[in-house]
Image (spheres, rainbow, N blue to C red):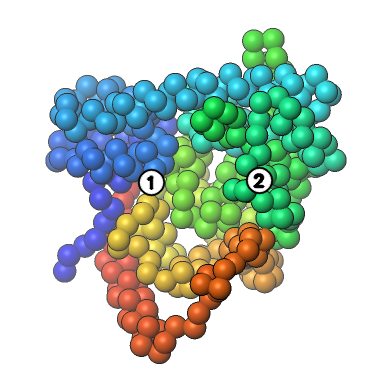
Amino acid sequence: MTCASLSPEAQLLLLTAGVPPNDTAMRRLLTAGIDWAHLCALAEHEKATSIVLRELWRLGLPTPDAGAHELRQRAAASVMQMLHLEQVLLKTLDVLAERGIEVMLLKGAALGYTAYPSFVDRSMGDLDLLVPPQRAEQAWSLLQTQGWTWPSARWASQRYTAHQHLPPLIQEPGGGSRLEIHGDLLPGGHPFRFSAATMWAQAKQVCLNGRVLTVPHPRHQLWHVCVHFSWSHEMQWGTWRTLRDVAAIIRRGDVEWPEFVDLARESRAGTCCFWTLRLSRRLAGADVPDRVLAALRPPRPELLLERIERHYVSNLFPSQDGCPSVQLARRLWEAGILPRWSGHGPVRPWQVSERWMAGSEQHESEQPRHPSLWAQLRKLGAGLAYLRRTQRFALPVNAR
């Protein structure tokens, strides 16, 4: 019986997320042969081109000029974009500081100055800034007088009434830089017992060329990365950066594991943290202690956890063999996260996107339609075939 697995290109991409990467496994995949066009597409999708190219160069293995040309071009563009984005960030922080608006860097911007050697080393598509909620509107309006633009036709304000950030701003020309002003960490109505006020109270400061930047405590950084991926993103996108972030935060060496476990449990994020940490250890070789996974483990037998994990891993990247049903994917997400057992009640992450859609006008053609019986039977058959396929899925192991 054929055993399905992630493509060699996806496996190689995941290996580059290791901090440090697993050189032996990377060499093995490269020697066996890589579809360079597919690797380039995956790396671009995950905003990983510059890191992937750097790791390939570091190994010193020859790459075909034709196959690697596009990767080199995109990697160079990514580095230039990150250098520009850093300058944009620093200017934006200066503008807000002049008005006395406190700012905490979130997500990629914070990680670039804490978990990684440099800002450029942590690729990102936008800037996330947390400000006191009572000053979020002021900061958002102020920046629109400083070169930032709100494309209201694209991001209508009514979509953000219960969101953790205000409508995104872009900087012209070209709209290459994007900024989100946050008043909170997660959308309104989320089930977690953790607030932005707690993050502010325990925030750290780092010095950068005469500036003092405010960043989250390492424990809170790791918590936010885990919850953002497992809950907000339902473990379906942002994979490469998440795994790499977890590995980088842990390698820094200042995560206090007993305190982190207590935070995860008390905030109702135990299973969310478990899955992000488990996947990071398996796929990126993150140094997650056994005792931490044991403490956060959902009350399921290991055989069932592994079967659920196969589904999660097989859907980390876009694929024609992915889960064919949104409803099935949601049920499998629930099977691993156990939201009711975790104290989440009826709250689910997809309700955020449903609120998002409710905030926009729907044309008659976009109204939901009831599928025919035949369509339902076909979907059921596709779902059963998918479940059988995932049980034959080979989980990769980033052993060191």
Q: Is residue 150 left or right of residue 249?
A: right
Q: Position of residue 212 (x, y in %)?
A: 72, 18
Please name which of the two marks, 2 or 1, marks the residue nearer to the observer. Answer: 2
**Is any atom of residue 212 visible in this view?**
yes
Crowdedness of circle 2 by 10 Å Cα count: few (<14), some, many (20+)?
few
Taking the spot 46% from the left edge, 55% from the top edge, the residue there is 236
Q: Residue furthest bottom?
A: 373
Q: Amino acid at mark 1?
A: Leu
Q: Is residue 342 visible?
A: no
* Relative height, residue 213 to residue 333 (above, below): above
Residue 152's disc is: 2
In which image quadrant can residue 345 be found? bottom right
* Left or right, 99 with reference to 155: right
Q: Residue at x 64, y 10 (%)?
A: 209
How far apart, in angstroms, are the residues tagged by discs 2 and 1? 39 Å
Residue found 47% across the figure and 46% down from its top? 238
Residue 28 coordinates in the image, percent (x, y):
19, 38
User: In front here: 157 or 274?
Assistant: 157
Q: Which residue is mark 1?
A: 283
Q: Quadrant of the C terminus?
A: top left
Q: Work out whether residue 127 or residue 397 is closer to the camera in this orientation and state it.
A: 127
Question: In what element is the residue under mark 1?
Answer: helix
Q: Residue 330 at what x, y percent from top left?
A: 50, 68
Count of labels shown?
2
Task: Look at label 2 and name its amino acid.
Answer: Ser
**For marks 2 and 1 on the same chain, the one whose residue lies earlier in the sequence:** 2
